[in-house]
Amino acid sequence: MQSTLDGLWGLSHAHAVALAPHCKTLSARRGEVIARRGSPLPGVMLMSIGSAKLSVRGAEGDERVLRIASAGDAFGEPTAMLGKPCLYDAVALSDVRVVILPASAILALVARDRRFARFVVLALSARSYTVLSEFSAATTQRGAQRLAGYLGSLERKNGSRGPTVQLPVSKTVVAALLGMKKETLSRLFRQFSSEGLIGMTRREIAILDPQGLAACTRSSRAHSA
């Protein structure tokens, strides 16, 4: 279990060793529910393999994807630590393996390890900041700005591996994540291509003009979406 924990949630090797005896694993097939809205979580959920979407549905059944959790990511930190019901459904987008880290084990290590306590504070602060940033983008930015920002985040996550990024999920899920219809997303992809910002082949996207894409993220100029 310790080797599985290494690198997840930014855990150090020493902290992974301390927490490993308390962890359990959960495997799920694509389309299966990992966590259900309104139910408690058994702990902080660390994605070891695969990816999952965290989403909510409106009264009319329309889905809003809040976040995509990929291998190495964690979700459910506030829910698990506070012992509150989950506020979203987590559904596997591929075959997944999840490491469940109980809140009791986290709190026990926090009580005796100052460095781990600092790590947890920073991790929860980063999650809070990310949520607020995403809410701000969803409420103040146009669709083109949100898409440009999303592509920029994929490029940053890609690091030094080149200017080509891969959509980690289907266009339908990306559209739900960005709060737009799939048709709007497709139109914006065509617009970005015609403007020379990107080149696209299925899920593979070449970032042709990183500066232009960044400017689009900041710009409030008229894109109709």
Image (spheres, grey):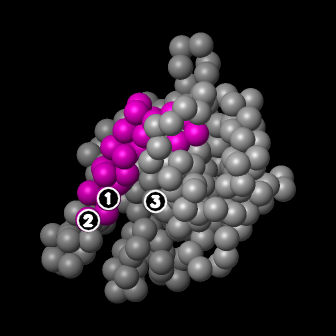
Overall secondary structure of the magenta stretch? helix
| Badge 1 vs badge 2, beta-carbon distance below 8 Å | yes
Q: Is the residue marked by circle 3 packed among few (<14), some (14-19), or many (20+) residues within 10 Å?
A: many
Residue at the image position 57 percent from the left and 56 percent from the top: 212
Per the rendered image, the range of residues in magenta is 122-146
Q: Residues within 10 Å of mark 2 (few under 14, many from 20)?
A: few
Where on the picture, by quarter, is residue 168? bottom right
Give the amino acid type for the residue marked by disc 3 in the picture.
Ala
Q: Nearer the viewer, residue 179 or 106?
A: 179
Give the residue at x 34% y 86%.
Answer: 14
Residue position marked by numbered label 3 in the rendering: 74
Residue 122 circle label: 2
- Disc 1 is placed on an element classified as helix
Q: Image height check: is 160 above or below 87?
A: below
If you read the primary sequence from the N terminus, does the residue marked by circle 2 or circle 3 appear first?
Answer: 3
Residue 132 or residue 214, whichever sits in front = 214
Whether residue 26 is visible here, answered yes or no, is no
Q: Residue at x 46, y 37 (%)?
A: 220
Mark 3 secondary-structure assignment? strand
In the rendered image, which quarter contains the C terminus? top right
**Residue 6 image point, x, y percent:** 48, 80
In this rendering, does residue 211 appear at all? yes
